């Protein structure tokens, strides 16, 4: 319950509530925090108050903001749960998995932009973002006027280290 007449500003009271949700694990690293619009609605406060809540949480180093995407629990670069990854990232991961599995061999073409657009029901710009990400990571290369092809394994990114299993007793 907010003390609207007390000496502690509303934005700090709300930041304390959201901060507590983060510290007790209700909001986990990489998850979105309530948007300014949600804070306005849930706490019946003004836009500026909601904006100050986010600023306060950033100052406390509990959240970070990605322009155009929102604010998320943790420091900048904290990975998001896979279900929260942007669509282009999900598509890129799927194509990378088909390359890694050998379903698309080295130096073989990946599906066309049109095929990927139809398969995923997304715009061309989203597919182009996914392909650009794959190219940056080394999964694919593009030959002008020929298409985009799977890179040989030596160009793939290094696999992410698996967490070590605890030693057996």
Image: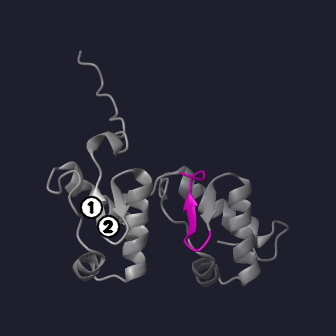
**Is the residue 53 above or below the residue 103 in the image?**
below
**Is the residue 51 above or below the residue 161 in the image?**
below
Q: Position of residue 39 (x, y in %)?
A: 62, 77
Is 46 a magenta residue?
no
Q: Residue furthest front?
A: 145
* Residue 70 visible at all: yes
Query: Which residues make up the magenta segment?
Result: 67-77
Residue assigned mark 2:
91
Residue assigned mark 1:
95
Query: CB atoms at circles 1 and 2 under 8 Å apart?
Result: yes
Residue pictured at 43% horizontal, 61% vertical = 133
| Relative horizontal placement of residue 24, taking residue 19 as reference (left or right) | left
Q: Quadrant of the N terminus?
A: bottom right
* Residue 13 visible at all: no
| Relative horizontal placement of residue 105, taking residue 162 as reference (left or right) | left
- Using the image as rendered, state which of residue 143 and residue 95 is in the foreground: 143
Q: Position of residue 89 (x, y in %)?
A: 39, 64
Label 2: state its secondary structure: helix
Magenta segment, principal secondary structure?
loop
Residue pictured at 26% horizontal, 75% vertical = 116
Residue pictured at 75% horizontal, 70% vertical = 52
């Amino acid at each position: 319950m907010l003390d609207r007449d007390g000496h502690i500003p509303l934005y700090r009271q709300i930041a304390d509530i959201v901060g507590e949700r983060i510290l007790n694990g209700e909001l986990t690293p990489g998850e979105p925090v309530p948007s300014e619009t949600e804070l306005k609605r849930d706490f019946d406060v003004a836009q500026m108050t909601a904006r100050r809540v986010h600023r306060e949480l950033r100052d406390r180093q509990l959240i970070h903001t990605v322009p155009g995407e929102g604010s998320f629990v943790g420091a900048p670069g904290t990975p998001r749960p896979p279900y929260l990854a942007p669509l282009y990232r999900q598509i890129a991961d799927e194509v990378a998995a088909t390359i890694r599995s050998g379903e698309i061999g080295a130096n073989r073409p990946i599906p066309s932009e049109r095929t990927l657009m139809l398969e995923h029901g997304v715009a061309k710009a989203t597919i182009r973002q996914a392909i650009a990400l794959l190219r940056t990571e080394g999964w694919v290369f593009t030959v002008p006027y020929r298409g985009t092809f799977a890179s040989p394994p030596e160009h793939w990114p290094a696999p992410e280290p698996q967490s070590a299993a605890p030693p057996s007793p």
